[in-house]
Image (spheres, helix red, strand yellow):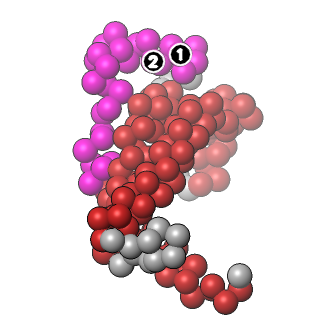
């Protein structure tokens, strides 16, 4: 019932390769999601600076603006990444042998649920993404400012 027992069962059922089941789908989620994440953060920061009449090269955003940019970044990340996350989760939790790979999961999902199935769970993901990533980016900016003496 613990972590060791879980690892033993996974290894017994699928061998060492089962520890890496879904790695390709994870990368398919994380690579474009990270591009959307940081891209949206930088884009939102620049647009918010323009709206506030702040020089993007020299000025700094208010904490509320950083929270807004960070929240939007998190939402962008999950909007881009949720289809691959749905596929990954279904592949990883399926009984061994149910799917031949992530392409098989994709085909079955589209056949059974249509394209909307790729966005299963997006509402709670976006609701969580805004405050979590807003706080994350605010913490990053405060830490960066605090450690600025190290530049």
Which of the pair 64/123 is nearer the observer? 64
Q: Is residue 150 visible?
A: yes
Residue located at (64% from left, 46% from top): 7
Q: Position of residue 14 (x, y in %)?
A: 66, 28
Check if residue 112 falls in the magenta segment. yes
Task: Return the mark for residue 106.
Answer: 2
Q: Kindly identify the residue that appears in the image at 27 percent across and 24 percent down.
A: 116
- Percent of width and height locating residue 141: 50, 76
**Which of 134/45 is in front?**
45
Query: From which residue to which does the magenta span run?
Result: 98-127
Would you say the residues marked 2 and 1 are in contact, meaning their CB atoms lie under 8 Å apart? yes
**Of 67 and 109, which appears nearest the observer?**
67
Q: Residue at x 59, y 46 (%)?
A: 6
Report whether 100 appears left or right of 67: right
Number of marks present in the image shown = 2
Q: What is the secondary structure assignment of the residue under circle 1? A: helix
Figure check: 72 above or below 15: below
Would you say the magenta stretch is mainly helix, strand or loop?
Answer: helix
| Residue for badge 1 | 103
Q: Mark 2 to mark 1: distance in Å?
A: 5 Å
**Residue 85 falls left or right of residue 111:** right
Q: In the rendering, which numbered label is found on residue 64?
A: none
Any part of residue 70 in sight: no
| Quadrant assignment for the C terminus | bottom right
The residue at the point 53 percent across, 16 percent down is 103
Q: Residue 120 sits in which quadrant? A: top left
**Who is closer to the viewer here, 118 or 91?**
118
The spot of residue 92 in percent (x, y) is 52, 32
């Amino acid at each position: 019932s613990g972590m060791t027992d879980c690892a033993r069962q996974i290894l017994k059922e699928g061998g060492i390769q089962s520890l890496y089941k879904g790695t390709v789908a994870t990368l398919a989620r994380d690579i474009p999601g990270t591009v959307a994440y940081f891209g949206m953060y930088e884009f939102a920061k620049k647009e918010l600076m323009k709206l506030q009449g702040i020089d993007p090269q020299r000025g700094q955003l208010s904490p509320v603006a950083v929270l807004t940019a960070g929240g939007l970044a998190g939402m962008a990340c999950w909007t881009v990444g949720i289809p691959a996350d749905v596929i990954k989760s279904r592949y990883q939790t399926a009984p061994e042998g149910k799917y031949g790979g992530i392409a098989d999961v994709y085909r079955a999902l589209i056949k059974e649920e249509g394209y909307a199935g790729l966005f299963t769970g997006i509402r709670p993901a976006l609701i969580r993404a805004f405050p979590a990533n807003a706080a994350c980016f605010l913490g990053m900016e405060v830490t960066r400012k605090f450690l600025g003496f190290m530049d």
